[in-house]
Amino acid sequence: MDLSQAYASMTGDLANTMSLLIVALAGLALVVFDAFKNRHAATPWIAGLALTAGFVFEVSRIGSAEGMAYYNMLRTGGSAAFVNALVLGSGVLSVILTAPYLKRIGHNIGEAYSMILFATVGMLVLGSANNLVTVFVGLETMSICLYILTGFIRSGPGSTESAFKYFLLGAFSTGFFLYGIALLYGATGTMDISAMRDTVADGGSIVFWAGVAMLLVGFLFKVSAAPFHMWTPDVYQGAPTTITGFMSTASKTAAFASLILILNVALPGERWSEVLAVFAVITMVLGNVIALSQSNIKRMLAYSSIAHAGYILVGLAAGSADGYSGALFYLMVYTIMNIGAFGVIALLEWDKKEGSEQTLDSLAGIGYKKPLLGWTMAVFMFSLAGFPPLGGFLGKWAVFAPAVEAGYVWLAIVGVLTSAVSAYYYLRVLVVFFMKPEDAQSGAAATNFVIPKSSAAVLIFCVVLLFLLGVTTYAIELTGSFF
Amino acid sequence: MEITLNWYLTLSALLFTMGVLGFLFRRNAIMMLMCVELMLNSVNITLVAFSQYLGDVSGQILVFFVMSVAAAEAAVGLALIIAIFRGKLTVDVTKINLFKY
């Protein structure tokens, strides 16, 4: 292949990966812009508009056929476009929520937005990677930006400590992930995920399965599945709240999308299915049971997000096309409800420590004082618990039904039982919000703030989407058409 | 005696295990960071050995990415360690225990 040919194919690829380029260039531009105009009001606007432009581009490409870009390094169109749209949409909502939040807590740091953009670039690469090299690069771009985002409030001990824990354990898991890649490469002779399938037909060698195991450890760490979840509560509690919403949704979406691709394309077969089922059970039980005893609401939501990773793993354990598309649908619903829930919590913080020490009881009676926050939180909690007619119910059905079809009836039963347990701690939030007499001190302080219009719009938007996802089948049919 | 692929893989596995054990048993944050670097670089040996053995260049390309990622991680990690040290005057990870359970 000569140079002009390579150039021609490259320019075609540039047009197909426009969202990636827009977000990356906007991130670079913001770094420079912020250096000259520190804390300028336009910074969040630039970030939000770049993410929105990427989102619109990817949504317009969801219906198009799946293709490859950059010599089979990235996938474009189809499910990759769906995952990218999900990541970018989560980024847009997070930026809108983050801008007033950072101003209110007095840490209006411009770099936060460029870091959100770079983390999004990493997630886009990870979510659409078709080569283990790009998977690694995407994963690390995302992770390193998230370490920084977790710890950018340097004045308080909570944020730094959680970033430090996230960094140490994240780097440790990266080692395993990388060793997994190296062993898979040695066993199959290729880094290309779609080319791996043909080389493992004979059952695979010990090197191959060791590689798969180590790769799984890396992935399960990133999606905070038990027993690799230890970092999650600390990090989610210490990180700035809207950033917690961002990384609990977008990074999980990207990592799960990559895991689904590897399971579906490179490792067809039944042998890892039971392994994933075991991890799903441990994750669901552990997340839901420990969440019961949490008094800090951010920590409770962290354990709840561990439990939700377990539900998604149920869909992956099913190992069928329905299971994978169900997992993608669940990720979409989960993104909307979790960003909404963390958005409400971000507005209800007045302990001056990014909510890291605020107990649930200090929010008593807030549902009547701030009806918008109370009622939107009610919708998010009911959806997280899986009540119809909200998106959470349809999402749970989408991951449990394929598991039953694949013969994992016991897995679905555990899932339903642990969801029933989860109703207790989700509804306890509402009991505290609406039925407890308010605390004289904190309640009075709570009513002093005005809900920013942009945040209110995001919360109402999430509520409307959750109702739409719960009563219409458009999205679930869309994800069903990918595999 | 001829040096074969297995020699490199064994060396790499030994170094990786040293890194893992060091990470698990050391309590000094900087030593833990160095153990992570040891893990990443031991994998580089595996990658280069496989790449040479298979006659395929993509393993060595990943090595370059791993080196740059390791550098970026060290930069962020050391910055975080300094931020922790300013507040606590220690880098002993057993003393960094604001959040528990």
Image (tube, grey):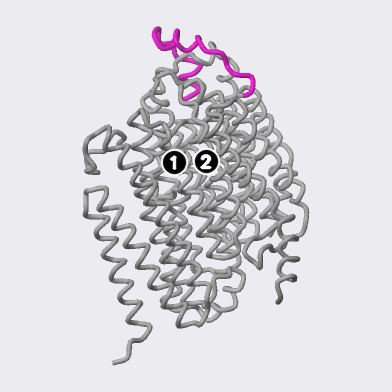
**Labels 2 and 1 share a subunit:** yes
- Rendered view: B14 above or below A50: below
Quadrant location of the C terminus of chain A? bottom right
Q: Which mark is residue B96?
A: none
Q: Position of residue A11 (x, y in %)?
A: 74, 60
Quadrant location of the N terminus of chain A? bottom right
Count of numbered circles on the image:
2
A287 left or right, relative to A249: left
Residue at numbered disc 2: A115
Q: Residue at x 52, y 41 (%)?
A: A115
Q: Quadrant of residue B35?
A: bottom left
- Amino acid found under the numbered disc labelled 1: Ile
Q: Residue at x 36, y 25 (%)?
A: A357
- Rendered view: B14 above or below A465: below
How dense is the environment of label 1, judged by Cα within 10 Å: few (below 14), some, or many (20 and up)? many
Helix, strand or loop for the magenta stretch, by majority: helix
How dense is the environment of label 2, judged by Cα within 10 Å: few (below 14), some, or many (20 and up)? many
- Amino acid found under the numbered disc labelled 2: Met
The Cα–Cα distance between marks 2 and 1, rounded to whole angstroms, is: 8 Å
Foreground of the two, B9 or A39: A39
User: Does A308 lie within the magenta span?
Assistant: no
Q: Chain of mark 2?
A: A
User: Does A442 lie within the magenta span?
Assistant: yes
Q: Quadrant of residue B2?
A: bottom left
Say if residue A464 shows up in the picture.
yes
- Rendered view: A393 above or below A343: below
Q: Are marks 2 and 1 in contact (CB under 8 Å)?
A: yes
**Which residues, given as a range, are shown in magenta?**
A428-454
Residue at numbered disc 1: A148
Q: Chain of mark 1?
A: A
